[in-house]
Image (cartoon, rainbow, N blue to C red):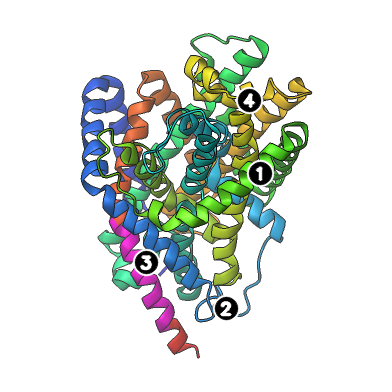
Amino acid sequence: MKDSTKPFDPMIFWVSSSVTVLFVLWSVLFPENMSHSINAVFAWTTTTWGWLYLITVFMLVAGCFVLMGPAYGPLKLGLETDKPEFSNFSWFAMLFGSAIAAGIVFWGPAEPAYHYMTPPPYFGGEALTPMAGANAMTYSFFHWGLSAWSIYAMLTIALAHACFTKNLPLKFSSAFYYVIGERIHTTWGKILDIFAVFATLGGLATTTGFVALQLSAGLKYQYGLTLGPSSTYLIIGVLTAIFTLSVYTGLEKGVKLMGDINMWIFVLVWFFILVAGPTIFLINLTTNSLGQYFQHFIPMSLFTGPGDTGNWIGSWTVFYWAWWMSWAPFVAVFIARISKGRTVRETVAATLILPTLGNFLWYGVVGGAGIHFDVTATLKEHGVESAIFAIAQNLPMTGILAVALIFLIATFFLTSANSAAISLAMFVSGHENPGRNLRAFWGIALGAVAAVLAGSGSLKAIQTASIATAFPLMFLLILVLFGTFRGLNRHRKENP
């Protein structure tokens, strides 16, 4: 079904590009109207449909554990002769870096501190107490644990198995082959891919803005360097140039190298904070929170916040589930692309179990350090983007650590931006290795959209808009969940 003569699908490319331009123009010319409209949609989805977000993600977690079982685990994502393209370390480094981006550095020290100040309604209790700290870490584990990664894992299996066993194009729409069959090659499939392009651009543009804010805050907080009003444009421009050059050089040279580098820096920074910080406190807090996480996992997964008039669940848990869903199309396509030849079990384990453990370790140490040093005052005064640098101020070798953190923020983001540009190129072409000019185009487009949105001052609204795009994705993921098992069962019968 692939048409290798076309560099891209004209309908998907031109429609998605046009929709993106129109949306950007709306945000620039009528920012208040756009903000009001998108916020209204987001408020409606979180308050009216929050319960379904919770149930959907809970079902995805259960489905992923079934996939790792004896019935489906041994199935290969590809033909029997297909072999993995990358080493285990490089594979996981690219997978983890593309999916987590700089979010783990941004929220790692900030979210536990927020919950420490304002205890979640599920636990309640008094703020700024040892119990509040343990509960804060438990909820941070929940938001960045199994539930979040199950969204990526299930969609990855649906995509990879269908593409590599049925010779389908590497597009978001191929994940629905086991749902609608050959109709993925019709207008229905093109609509799915257009939607995926739009969601990816919105999600990455927002992240680019946040990364620019955090890098700018780090330069100011650590070095007193104020770049002025143009700092956001300058940082976005530099980042865009780097990841566009990297994505132009190809997957093997660019993304693999960057993934390896940021994984090593990530481990070194984590180890340094653990050893140089309040080690025993961090170990005890992580261990205790891990136990609470497993004890409360099911109740937290289905907690809708009855009696809570502040919509805490909508602002945090549902917000996170929607945010991860908005990233799912490009992350799943990228992980599928690098997982050819691996089994269902090892791919789910690497996309669900290992990243969850990595997040637990990072949050337990970095977030725990934020609680121990009580960076809440810094959050109130300088914003969440300064939290990680406030922690660095309380540790030895602050200067070196700050440089490492800035480098880590940049490399994590660049890895994610690389994978997004490659995925976008695959969305509009369907080729496993899209042309370098097409990859570079989407790299530049990501940076350009981010710069325009950041310059319009509507990043918050665009972030909300990208969350709103997850509303239909929730229903699509339910279809993928049931379709995947139907397709795998059919495959087992046809290949006993």
Is the N terminus in the top left, top right, bottom left or bottom right quadrant?
bottom left
Q: Which of the numbered marks, if any, corresponds to residue 317?
A: none
Residue 476 higher or lower than 166, as above or below: above
Q: Residue 89, located in which quarter of the rendered image?
A: bottom right
- Residue occupying image coordinates x 60% and y 29%: 370
Disc 1 residue crowd, few under 14, some 14–19, many 20+, Cα 10 Å: some
- Residue occupying image coordinates x 21% and y 31%: 37
- Was residue 489 drawn as part of the magenta stretch in this picture? yes
Task: Indicate the amino acid at tag 1.
Answer: Asn
Q: What stretch is highlighted in magenta?
A: 475-490
Q: Mark 3 — residue?
A: 481
* Principal secondary structure, stretch drawn in magenta: helix
Q: Are marks 3 and 2 in contact (CB under 8 Å)?
A: no
**How far from the left and from the top, in percent, is residue 51?**
27, 51
The residues tagged by marks 3 and 1 sit, at their Cα atoms, a distance apart of 37 Å
Q: For numbered disc 4, what is the local secondary structure?
A: loop
Point out the frontmost of discs 3 and 4.
Answer: 4
Point out the frontmost of discs 1 and 4.
Answer: 1
